[in-house]
Amino acid sequence: MIVRIATLIFVMTIFSCQPKKEDTKPMKVAHNEAHKKKVIYQVFPRLFGNTNTTNKPWGTLAENGTGKFSDFSEKALQEIKDLGVTHIWYTGVPHHALITDYTAYGISKDDPDIVKGRAGSPYAVKDYYNVNPDLADNVENRLEEFKELIARTHDAGLKVLIDIVPNHVARNYEGKSTPEGSEPFGFSDDQTKEYARNNNFYYIPNSEFKVPNWENGYLPLGGKDHELADGKFTEIPAKWTGNGSRDAQPNMNDWYETIKVNYGVRPDGTYDFEKLPEKFNKENYKKHYDFWQGKDVPDSWVKFKDIALYWLALGVDGFRYDMAEMVPVAFWSYMNSHIKMENENALLLAEVYQPSLYRDYINKGKMDYLYDKVELYDSLKHIMQGHGWTDHIPKVLEGLQDVEHHMLHFLENHDEQRIASPEFAGNALKGMPAMVVSATSTTSPTMIYFGQEVGEPGAENAGFGQPSRTSIFDYIGVPHHQRWVNAKKYDGGQLSENKKKLRDFYKRLLNFTISSEALMGNYQDIHYFNKERTQGYDHRVLSYVRWSTSEKLVIVSNFEANDSRVFELKIPEEIIKEWELNEGIHSVEDALYGSKKKLVVENGIGKISVSLEPLQSFIFKVK
């Protein structure tokens, strides 16, 4: 969530690194070359198919509209697949707190004093065994409609991911759909104690929850009348807030709409569960599963494990875990090993922002992938904004070499600003070279956010959500994306020619990445080699090579938005030897648009005459 990231990310210094001899050593990647890259398409069903263009701040569902599961038609899913996508992350599927009145369907009302926006935060889940009623054509049949969406997605050749939010639940969590034989979170808690090992929540004994004091002119629902918007919410005793606040009256900048889940971590930070053995980070998920058999674990562990297995049984292919670093690594060993025993191919993606924790969550927590935000994303953002140097990128990749396959790359998601927004880069085209680097520099998966491929700027003042990010809290339309939806024809019929070209670029790039064997092979930086030797090559250009036994690539990008770059790109002698290229002329062809060049090998060094237009990239395949 947006408010979370600022408290957890440290600022990275962008600097000019001096060339070193070791910079030209190949990065060997021991992955099966038959495996191909994954591409994840993150999409909010509530926003995807909404064709309403009213966009009234704090507008109701009736005023501003909402998308539905059914909007993901066979045509829509095929277009997403054809973009070069392998997995869809349907964001906001579990039933979360929201303001629209569904009492006619046996769903209790939610209080605006503890809900963000009218549509509500997807990270304040109210019932883990059902889905968001906004997304159904028939609310009574909402879970069946989601099952049908899973089936349609699979029929399109795509995998399904949904969210699990382990650190917290909605302040008014009910779990009405919890299966017989299980209990909702908090149902059997001893509320007289701040902490008990098998309590699901932490309590503030002898207290009463108070709604935050609203500041800077903020009022729930923008101050519009609502029977429950009275500055009160009954919670006795008060519970700890999702971000760990122990105040009965949290601050308005706390995650006041949520309550923190107890994983057997005592209030002093010590653990009330068995630790993993030393060096267990080297063991596979089966060994982790075996370790937990017969062991007494906190009740919250079992509840979340059961939730994950429930969704797997419905056909979901994996999960994105919100703020996973706020939950103990040992729990993830337990949770993920149980998931993998049910489906060894389940994709497990976690939001972790502290680089010092990466290896524990990958190796001990058995995560498949983590967000590469603090390292690669932040570096690319600085470069796109014009004040970062490409010199930093090889150092980032070098520092993550041992876990590079596990670091998911992205340029947009629901927490981050849209590239086209003035607050980020102000121009969607500035994301093109960064997207090439994000998608081709490692073996890790790539993620794009719906609307990114058509330059969505996130300019709406939605109410709770503010411009630069497409709001996840409000009923809102997404204008540039709606032009691609084109009255649910999903053909881009209302896009400008420039936006059609941008989407075509993404389509060419992503389809190449999921078919390339070299991108699951080896990497070597040639940036410093060229910066030291090549006239016209500078810190706004980046180059590297990728290869497998069957494919050899030379990748070069110009991050400069206003100036071309013309130079003779050089390939180091050790790469020429590795690729077994003889002296003389070899043909190369750009994998994106098909232009052809010559790679001349002379005295052991390869050379390609390159003319890069502003923001242009080449992915040269050596014939």
Image: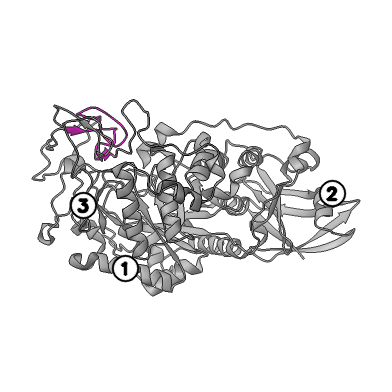
- Residue shown at 63% from the left, 53% from the top: 616
Above or below — where is 78 with respect to 521? below
Q: Nearer the viewer, residue 558 or 178?
A: 178
| Residues at discs 1 and 3 in contact (Cβ within 8 Å) | no
Q: Which residue is mark 3?
A: 175
Q: Would residue 599 appear left or right of 560 to someone viewing this image?
A: right
Q: What kind of element bears circle 3? A: loop
The amino acid at mark 1 is: Lys
> Can residue 381 be seen in this snapshot?
no
Helix, strand or loop at label 1? It is helix
The structure residue drawn at horizontal position 21% and vertical position 52%, both measured from the top left corner, is: 175
First in sequence, mark 1 or 3: give its number: 1
User: How far from the left and from the top, in percent, is residue 450?
Assistant: 42, 57
* Closest to the observer, 314 or 148: 314
Q: Quadrant of residue 55?
A: bottom left
Rendered image coloring scheme: one colour
- Report if residue 210 lies within the magenta region: no
Q: N-terminal of the two: label 1 or label 2?
A: 1
381 or 455, which is in the foreground?
Answer: 381
Amino acid found under the numbered disc labelled 3: Gly
- The image quadrant that residue 7 belongs to is top left
Q: Secondary structure at mark 2?
A: helix
Say left or right for 434 vs 573: left
Q: Residue at x 43, y 41 (%)?
A: 330
Residue lying farthest left? 227
Q: Residues within 10 Å of mark 3 (few under 14, many from 20)?
A: some
User: Which kind of residue does numbered mark 2 sit on?
Assistant: Glu
The answer for how far apart the CA atoms under marks 1 and 3 are is 19 Å
Q: Is residue 378 left or right of residue 413?
A: right
- The residues colored magenta run 238-260
